[in-house]
Image (cartoon, helix red, strand yellow):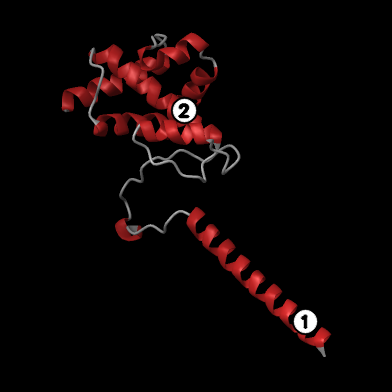
Amino acid sequence: MESILLAVIIGLAVWLFMKNARKMRERRDRLSQPPPDADADAGDAPQPKSMPRFGVPRTITREQMARLKEHDFEPNRQWSKDEAQLILDSVTYLRAAIRMVTGESGAPTEIQNNILGFILGDEELRDDILDWGLNRTQEEEDAGEEVELPPDETFDLIANHIRELWEDG
């Protein structure tokens, strides 16, 4: 009799555990999916470009999360360390470009966000910034936003975009 009662209790515990695990998995999957378009009826409205996901999800480091918070980002634990590093490198690059183009060390957040969207939304610029970040020397990394950027096609595209935004603003 006791063994039957014990088997029922164990079976119930396993069933509750499995039910809870299934709910948690469904919730995690729901959170990792992009929200449905609220303006699906907008039709011809241009969709903003977005950065495709890459790297191994959920590998963002604590250091990267802290650095992103320093740059006024709200990091997501679903990000890969590669995505987080690309964002950090892009912010460093765009702030250095703003300083070089305008002579000012700061820019309004809206302008920085616009430039970041411009960089991350364009595959070629994104790849160039990724390469730039991977090839930086220790001295350049230590210089932070005071780094001197190479005068190449990437810099020219971003500099032109900065000038347009600066003139409009």
First in residue order: circle 2 vs circle 1: 1
Under tag 1, what secondary structure? helix
From the top left corner, tell me how far across and down residue 82 is, in percent. 54, 32
Q: Name the residue under label 2.
A: 126
In space, the residues marked 2 and 1 are separated at their CA atoms by 60 Å
Under tag 2, what secondary structure? helix
Q: Which mark is residue 6?
A: 1
Q: In this view, does 125 lie to the left or right of 43?
A: right
Q: Which amino acid does label 1 sit on?
A: Leu
Q: Is residue 100 left or right of residue 135?
A: left
Graded by Cα atoms within 10 Å as few (under 14), some (14 to 19) or many (20 or more), the crowding at tag 2 reads many
Q: In which quarter of the image is the C terminus?
A: top left
Residues marked 2 and 1 touching at CB (< 8 Å): no
Residue 137 visible in the picture: no
Q: Residue sitting at 36 percent across and 42 percent down?
A: 48
From the top left corner, tell me how far across and down residue 131 is, in percent. 53, 20
Q: Which amino acid does label 2 sit on?
A: Arg
Q: In this view, does 35 lie to the left or right of 46?
A: right
Q: Residue sitting at 51 percent across and 36 percent down?
A: 62
